[in-house]
């Protein structure tokens, strides 16, 4: 039954509407089931993962798992996590004034329980849109337990004239505040080991401990972690007990075909409308641009462990059109087409996005970019000029 959220403002009205609570993982599961049953696209705008990553992600969601997306940079890990928001219900009810998005029918915070006890069915509620149910934290070495879990707030204690023994002086961190939401921790291995340890109970039992307060808060959170395999050796690692508590680990990858890579680049490139209309880009130029990234991923000069991001092709495409546009303006032309010489303008977009090994450093970034350009031409030449 569909709830008319615009007409419901109190707990009593919510009960009268026969609203039933469900966990965020059940929301994701049932809405995903609905989309799959109807043959609808589940992760719009993600190309090349239709037979690999997306089926695995769908299975993880159906299993109600917390998820770790493991892959090199520029493989749409965070994009996938953000798109999970579309699988949530459009609106959910929240106790008005609750710091941790309490469910009116199943409150867990002291504030909400006392408010409902005092006002009963007249307890005010608000509605939270799914776009506001996505929280994201980049794991950096300076992240603290207080940032994620919470801490005692001395100013709050002074204003309310409460002792530090009263749990109302607690200032909740990002994780409790993301109750009933999707919470993403990017670059998980960068999080210090002692901070990772603080996530154990939240993932498994739902307990959180803040400055000696043991709070039994059965938080309802869909965790999504992202990690780069390079981080395991260079900067840090995911502690084993934490990995054990993450339900599914899904490996992402780069596009395997030029056509898929072209589709991604055309979708993501930020182009001016007049620029797109005045410059013709032949298919050969588009293929050549994507082939540069493919060559970089297997080049002896480029560090394969670091990867070559899809952003390389995207920014190179933008530079390519800007180079042709600049040439046209100088020569007084209103329209033009991409030429082979315009590819010299994409070098700055390449050199800043590839990590070179020792041999590559010896050659220099600009020269390596030209070598990749030459290799791309050699690879594509037989496709356009086959032997007679």
Image (cartoon, helix red, strand yellow):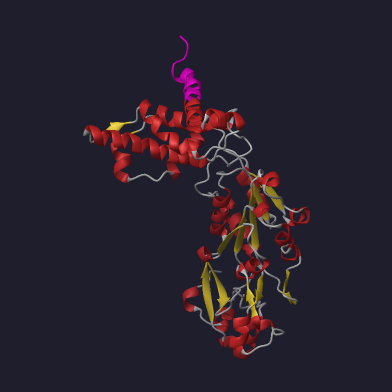
Residue at position x 51%, y 79% from top? 8
Q: In the rendered image of this protein, does residue 266 appear above or below residue 368? A: below
Image coordinates for residue 42, horizontal then vertical, percent? 55, 51
Q: Quadrant of residue 34?
A: bottom right
Q: Where is residue 386 drawn, in percent x and y?
A: 47, 14
Left or right relative to 3: residue 145: right
Q: Residue at x 49, y 40 (%)?
A: 352
- The stretch drawn in magenta includes residue 242: no
Give the magenta part as a residue range: 374-388
Q: Which is nearer the eye, 194 or 120?
A: 194
Residue 45 x, y percent position in the rendering = 49, 47
> Relative to 140, is 374 above or below?
above
- Main SS of the magenta segment? helix
Locate the N terminus and report the quarter of the image it occupies.
bottom right
Nearest the eye: 53 or 197 = 197
Q: Position of residue 303 (x, y in %)?
A: 61, 35
Nearest the eye: 50 or 109:
109
Residue farthest to the top, as pictured:
388
Q: Is residue 68 above or below residue 208?
A: above
The answer to whether any part of residue 38 appears in the image is no
Residue at the extreme left of the image, as rendered: 332
Asked whether the viewer can see residue 29, the reply is yes
In front: 253, or 228?
228
Location of residue 288 (image quadrant): top left
Reply yes or no: does residue 383 show up in magenta.
yes
- Which quarter of the figure is the C terminus placed in? top left
Q: Tally the numbered discs.
A: 0
Determine whether 337 is above or below 238 in the image: above
Image quadrant where residue 201 sits: bottom right
């Amino acid at each position: 039954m569909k709830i008319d959220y615009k007409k419901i403002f109190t707990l009593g009205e919510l009960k009268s509407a026969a609203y039933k609570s469900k966990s965020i993982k059940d929301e994701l599961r049932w809405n995903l089931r609905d989309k799959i049953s109807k043959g609808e696209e589940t992760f719009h705008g993600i190309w090349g993962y239709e037979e690999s990553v997306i089926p695995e992600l769908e299975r993880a969601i159906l299993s109600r798992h917390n998820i770790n997306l493991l892959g090199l940079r520029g493989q749409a890990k965070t994009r996938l996590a953000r798109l999970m928001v579309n699988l949530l219900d459009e609106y959910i009810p929240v106790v008005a004034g609750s710091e941790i998005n309490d469910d009116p029918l199943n409150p867990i915070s002291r504030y909400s329980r006392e408010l409902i006890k005092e006002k009963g069915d007249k307890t005010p509620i608000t509605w939270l849109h799914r776009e506001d149910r996505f929280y994201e934290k980049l794991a950096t070495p300076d992240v603290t337990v207080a940032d994620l879990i919470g801490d005692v707030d001395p100013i709050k204690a002074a204003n309310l004239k409460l002792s530090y023994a009263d749990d109302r002086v607690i200032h909740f961190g990002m994780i409790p505040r993301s109750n009933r939401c999707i919470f993403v921790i990017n670059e998980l291995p960068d999080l210090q080991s002692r901070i990772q340890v603080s996530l154990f109970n939240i993932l498994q039992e739902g307990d959180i401990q803040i400055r000696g307060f043991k709070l039994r808060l059965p938080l309802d959170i869909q965790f999504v972690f992202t990690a780069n395999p390079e981080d395991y050796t260079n900067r840090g690692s995911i502690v084993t007990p934490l990995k054990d508590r993450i339900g599914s680990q899904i490996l992402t990858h780069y596009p395997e075909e030029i056509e898929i890579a072209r589709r991604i680049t055309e979708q993501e490139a930020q182009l001016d409308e007049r620029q797109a209309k005045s410059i013709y880009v032949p298919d050969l130029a588009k293929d050549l641009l994507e082939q540069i990234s493919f060559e970089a991923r297997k080049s002896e000069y480029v560090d394969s462990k670091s990867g070559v991001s899809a952003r390389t092709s995207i920014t190179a495409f933008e530079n390519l059109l800007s180079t042709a546009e600049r040439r046209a303006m100088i020569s007084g032309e209103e329209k033009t087409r991409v030429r082979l010489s315009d590819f010299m303008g994409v070098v700055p977009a390449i050199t800043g996005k590839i990590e070179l090994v020792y041999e590559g450093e010896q050659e220099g970034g600009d020269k390596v970019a030209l070598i990749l350009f030459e290799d791309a031409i050699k690879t594509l030449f037989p496709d356009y000029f086959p032997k007679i």
